[in-house]
Amino acid sequence: MTKVRSTYLLLLAMAIAFPYLVPDPDFWVSSGGSRALWLGVTALSMSFLNRNLGLMSLGQLFFSGISGYIVAISSVTYGVKFGTSVPLAILAGTLSGVVIGFIALKTKGVYFLMLTLAVTLGLYSFANSAQEITRGHTGINSIPSPVIFGIDFAYTKPMYYLFLLIAITIFTFCKFLESTSFGIALKGVRDNEDRMTAMGYRILPLKMIAFVFSALIASIAGVMGAFYVTNISPDSVGLIRSIDLLVIVVVGGATYLGGAFVGAALIVVFEAIVQDFTQYYVAATGALFIIVLMLAPQGLMGISAQFRRARAKKLGAAK
C-alpha cells in the first residue's frame, strides 16, 4: 500500500469517526463537518478546472445557484418531491454549463475570470429583481430536507454522512478521470495548446467536457447548500460568496484536488472560533488568507512540496 493511499484511508477513517470525536457534536458536525464538505465540493469544481486546464472560474456559484434555486422553487412554491426536483436542478445547472462554457472558453486568462464572474453577478441581479420567481432579497426559506428510506436528513449526523458520501464519490471520480487518457489530454492542453492541436487533438471539445463536468459538481453542491442552509437568497450567489470560494481554493492549494476540502475545513473552523471573539471575523479571515499565502504560496497542500524544494536547494548549495 502506497503512502498516499494510506493517508487517504486514514483521513477517511477520521472523517467517519468525526461526529464521535468532537465535543459538542450538534454544533461541530453541522457548522464544521457538513458545512466544510458542502463548501469543499463547491471549491472542488473550481480546483478541478484550475488543476487540469489552468483556468480559474468564478462562475461556479452560477451553476450552484441555478440548481439551488430550482430545488427551492420547485419544493417550496410548487411542492415537488425531491426525487424529481433534485435531478431536475442538477440537470439545469449542468446544461447551463454548456451554454456558459461555449462562450467563456473562447477567452483566456483574466478575460475568462471576469466573464465567469460577470455571469454569477448576473444571476445575483436577476435573483434580486425577479420577485415573483425568487422572492427577491428575502429569498426562499424553509426548504424541506429529503427523507430517503425513512432517514430524515434534516438531522445532523445523517446529513453529515450523506455529504461525506457525496464528497468521497465526486473526489474519487475526479482522481479517476485524471488517470484516464482524457485527463492526460487535459493536462496536455493546459501545458501547451498549440502542441496538442498539432498532434491532432480538438481542443475546444476537451475544454467543454471538463467545464461542463465542473458545472455538474457545482450543481450538486448547490443542492447540498439548499438542503444544508434550508434557504437561498441573492446573497448566496453574490460577489462576497465568490470571493469566499476563491479564498478557500487558494488557501487549500489551487492546483490540488484535496486542497478544496483542506481550505474549506480551515476557513470553516477558523470562522466558527473567531466569531466568538469578534464581530470582524471577515477581516480576520482576510488576515488569515494573507498569512497563509505569505508562508505557503502554493496553499496548505503545497507545503510538503515547498519543503522538498527548499531542502533540495540547500543540498545543491552545499555541494
Image (cartoon, grey):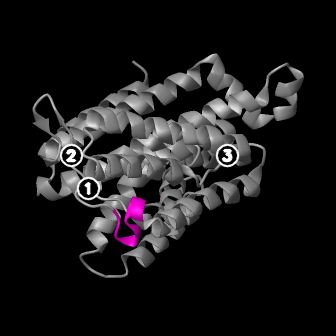
Residue closest to the eye, 189 or 125:
125
Check disc 1 and give the amino acid type: Thr
Please tell me which residue is depicted at 64% across the width and 21% down the height of the picture.
182
Magenta stretch, main secondary structure class: helix
Q: How crowded is mark 3: few (under 14 residues within 10 Å), some or many (20 or more)?
A: many
Secondary structure category for the residue under label 1: loop
Seen at 57% across and 65% down, the residue is 294
167 w.r.t. 107: above or below: above
Q: Which amino acid does label 3 sit on?
A: Leu
Q: What stretch is highlighted in magenta?
A: 132-139
* Percent position of residue 116, x then y: 64, 54
Nearest the viewer among 14 and 187 is 187
* View extreme (bottom): residue: 279
Asked if labels 2 and 3 touch by Cβ distance under 8 angstroms, the answer is no
Q: Is residue 297 left or right of residue 43?
A: right
Mark 1, residue position: 230
- The N terminus: image quadrant: top left
| Residue 183 is inside the magenta segment | no
Which quadrant of the rendered structure holds the C terminus? top right
* Residue 145 numbered tag: 2
Front of the two marks 1 and 3: 1
Whole-angstrom CA distance, mark 2 to mark 1, is 8 Å
Residue under the point 47% across and 63% down: 127
Q: Would you say 63 lies left or right of 220 here?
A: right
Residue 249 vertical placement versus 187 (above, below): below
Residue pointed to by mark 3: 55
